[in-house]
Amino acid sequence: MIIELPMGLGSVSAELLLIILPALAALIVFALVFGGDSTGKQTRRRIDRIRTSNMKTITPEEIVSIRRSDTDSEIAVLDSLIKRLTPRPEVLRLRLASAGYGSSLGRYLFICLIFGLVTFSGLQFFKLVPILVSVLVALFTAIMLPHLGLTFLIRRRRNRFIAHFPEAIDLMVRGLKSGLPITESIKAAGSEIPDPVGTELSRITDTVRLGESLEDALWDASKRLDIQEFNFFTVALAIQSETGGNLAETLSNLSDVLRRRRQLKLKIKALSSEAKASAYIIGSLPFIMALLIYLVNPDYISDLFTDDRGIFLVCLGFLSFGMGIGVMYKMVKFEI
């Protein structure tokens, strides 16, 4: 007996497959990266059973592990692939730490994969460009969009750190004047100042408690933050530990210098705002005029995108446009 299916139900269009297959691949990778292995789950269940049955004989120090994990994925195969195939993984880990996210490198690469798959599926679904161009655009999107997003998060966190750091130094100065050592003063400032300053200072004190010297902990934080204001603080403490002197007075002067430095930055930003506004207006004029011409007479501007000479002129125009933006950016950017 043969059952005939209605037309249209027995086949799936190629456009739909281009959406379904990348989505399934993303789900599989998501399950592999975030699911973990069964051995780890069984181990955690055994620990929970021991904890509930023999809670009186097990101390929290025996349950909680203080070892620093250096794995990028819970799956050993993916972890080895990430370490071998990722160029300079330590730089990506440092950028993630600078942004204030403790996510593993595997999760960041999974986000990159999602951006690439979504871009490739969208371009192929609407048939905008050939498949080779879609692959190149998807690869560019998978690399650049997460990178730009992470750069934005790092810059935002650094600005918040710079805004609250002088207040933390003032709290340290008060603690030193009251007789507290520098480590206790840093701890007190870390508990009072909000994130990200409080988080970083608390992390420094926790590192010192584990046996590392204060100077090494400060240099590790300087490498992670990459902020000049914190580098000044680290250098001041390092010099004072070698030469001696009044640390409270040194930090008080440093706090005053950091506040004046921030005020000068805001003043420069206000003075250069007119030039930035002019750059935004001038930079948007070519796109606005192209849109108006297209709305009035589409055939007049279509040669720029269909003829080889027009495409060459458009590429040349974008090149000149990018060079002009770069020059104006350098003109309004000042290093203090």
Image (cartoon, rainbow, N blue to C red):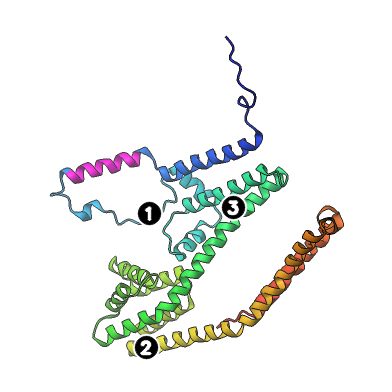
Q: Please name the residue that numbered disc 3 is placed on.
A: 142
Magenta segment boundaries in residue numbering: 39-52
Q: Please name the residue that numbered disc 1 is placed on.
A: 69
Q: Residue at x 68, y 76 (%)?
A: 279
Answer whether residue 230 is visible to the viewer in this image.
Answer: no
Q: How many marks?
A: 3
- Tag on residue 252? 2
Q: Are marks 2 and 1 in contact (CB under 8 Å)?
A: no
Image quadrant where residue 284 sits: bottom right
Q: Nearer the viewer, residue 50 or 212?
A: 50
For discs 3 and 2, the disc positioned in front in the rendered view: 3
Q: Main secondary structure of the magenta part?
A: helix
Q: In terms of secondary structure, where does tag 1 sit?
A: loop
Q: Which image quadrant: the C terminus?
A: bottom right
User: Which amino acid lies under the numbered mark 1 shown in the image of this protein?
Assistant: Ser
Looking at marks 2 and 1 on the same chain, the residue that comes earlier in the sequence is marked by: 1
